[in-house]
Image (cartoon, rainbow, N blue to C red):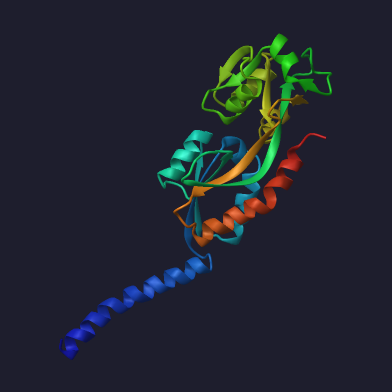
Amino acid sequence: MCRSAFMAVVATLLPETERALAQMRDQANLRKGRVAIAALPTIYSSVLPSLIAGFVDQYPGVELVIEDVASATCVDLVRSRQVDFALCASSSGAQDLHVERLASDRFYFVCRADHPLAGRRQLKAEEVQARYPIIVYANASSIRQHLDAAIYPLQWRQSFQVNSLSTAAAFVAAGLGATIVPTLGLPQFQPMDARFIPIQLALNRRDICVLSLKDRELSLAAQTFVALVRANIANEIERLTPS
């Protein structure tokens, strides 16, 4: 290759190489990047907003992509590589997934002040199941799956089945029944001055985990966000826990 041809190749490749190196430096310094996160709606509506706000303020060049979906969909999005990781209820027995437990929350019977059980300080699942219908959630919901497993082979008496906590909160506020939700779901019911009564279940706590693919290394930006959640989620859950 003659010198002029060689210099032409160098002139073409050098800007691309410099751009690639600049992009790597930006990502290393978290000036640029993209993090796609799947999480349960209860997580997105409770603990994540303040963490996201802090992350965006510190790393304004990193794009955050949000997927607020049911637990099963969280797993599907991780496996299809549409998101970097998921924050959801525990998913065990999956050989392709790395599962790290971050924290746990417990469950509360939620009702209006005029409900027959409103004055109780604590409840057992069996006494609620035997006498009082509750507002339940769709089968894909991690809340529904946990509650059903907690009293199996019995079944909850159902007043209504809904898809979202916001609908359940509106129904409770209207006097259409009571429901059972984890700590992360309680903020949906606070505007109506609901009663939050601890309920004893055979499976009394729900693990909140971060899921990622074992064969996929998280980007520095994704690792930084996971570290932020890891450092704060237990305190956030404690903050939401009724006194």
Q: Nearer the viewer, residue 50 or 40?
A: 40
Residue 196 shows up from this direction? no
Left or right: 38 as drawn, with respect to 152: left
Farthest-out residue, left? 2
Q: In the rendered picture of this protein, how many numbered marks are placed on residues?
A: 0
Q: Quarter holding the C terminus?
A: top right
Q: Nearer the viewer, residue 135 or 124?
A: 124
Q: Quarter holding the N terminus?
A: bottom left
Q: Nearer the viewer, residue 174 or 210?
A: 210
Residue drawn at x 60%, y 50% is: 52
Query: Which quarter of the figure has residue 116?
Result: top right
The vertical placement of 86 against 200, above or below, is: below
The vertical placement of 208 against 154, above or below, is: below
The x, y position of residue 65, in whole percent, is: 48, 48
Residue 189 shows up from this direction? yes
The vertical placement of 98 against 33, above or below, is: above
Residue drawn at x 51%, y 27% is: 140
Farthest-out residue, bottom? 3
Left or right: 164 as drawn, with respect to 50: left
Residue drawn at x 65%, y 52% is: 230
The x, y position of residue 96, in whole percent, is: 46, 46
Left or right: 141 as drawn, with respect to 185: left
The x, y position of residue 215, in whole percent, is: 44, 53
Farthest-out residue, top? 131
The x, y position of residue 151, in whole percent, is: 65, 20
